[in-house]
Image: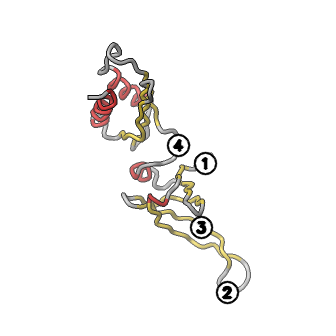
Amino acid sequence: MTFKEKVADLLKTALEERPSLFLIDFSITGANKIMVTLDGDNGVNLQDCIDISRAIEHNLDREEEDFSLEVASGGAASPLKMPRQFRKNIGRTLSVKTATEQIEAEITDANDEFIVLEWEAREPKKIGKGKETVQKRLELPYQDIKEAVVVIKF
């Protein structure tokens, strides 16, 4: 079993014990720097990161292979990558970049294939001059999303 496989197994076991947490990213550099990025259905707190870190670190032997370990949450400004992250953010405003446009809208639904965005837009009236406010709705497949970030408003 390679070092990376051993770490991946320890990480998988630790996450199975905490079903509200899920893995966003996992990598090991050539210098054995282990980097784990987590998210959770209810967010990720410091204790979650400590618990996952200990589950990995206490089961590896630095005498066999030296390493450094970093366990962190995705952060508020990190792009959303997984359907589970989109579902967690239903009701919030997202900034979504596709190949052709940038949309800022509320995510109202998400499943394993696509997300649903809704927003109001000002468009020219069909008859007469001026503009009117219209309600827009878009079902956007995940493969069409280049980047999606939660808009943080103060």
What residue is drawn where x is 54% and y is 49%? 150
Q: Which residue is mark 4?
A: 78
Above or below — where is 87 with respect to 71? below
Quadrant in which the N terminus appears: top left
Secondary structure beneath dot 1 equals loop
Q: Nearer the viewer, mark 3 or mark 4?
A: 4
* Residue under label 2: 127
Mark found first going from the N terminus, 2 or 3: 3
Residue 112: image quadrant is bottom left
**Cα distance in 3D space between marks 1 and 4:** 15 Å
Indicate the amino acid at tag 4: Ser
In the rendered structure, find residue 120 and report the number of the disc placed on it. Answer: 3
Q: Residue visible at 31% across and 20% down?
A: 60
**Sequence-first disc among 1 and 2:** 2
Residue 48: image location, x then y, percent: 39, 31
- How far apart, in angstroms, are the residues tagged by discs 2 and 4? 43 Å
Q: Pinpoint residue 114: horizontal percent, then vertical percent.
A: 42, 61
- Between marks 1 and 2, how big is the CA–CA gap? 36 Å
Q: Quadrant of the C terminus?
A: top right
Residue 65 percent coordinates (x, y): 35, 18
Percent coordinates x, y for residue 20 in the rendering:
34, 41
Within 10 Å of the Cα at label 1, are there few (<14), some (14-19), or many (20+) other Cα atoms?
Answer: few
Mark 2 is surrounded, within 10 Å at the Cα level, by few (under 14), some (14 to 19) or many (20 or more) other residues, namely few
What amino acid type should be assigned to the residue bearing mark 1?
A: Lys
Q: Of the residues under marks 3 and 4, which one precedes in the sequence?
A: 4
Looking at the rendered structure, the kind of residue marked 3 is Glu
Q: Which mark is residue 32?
A: none
Location of mark 1 (residue) = 153
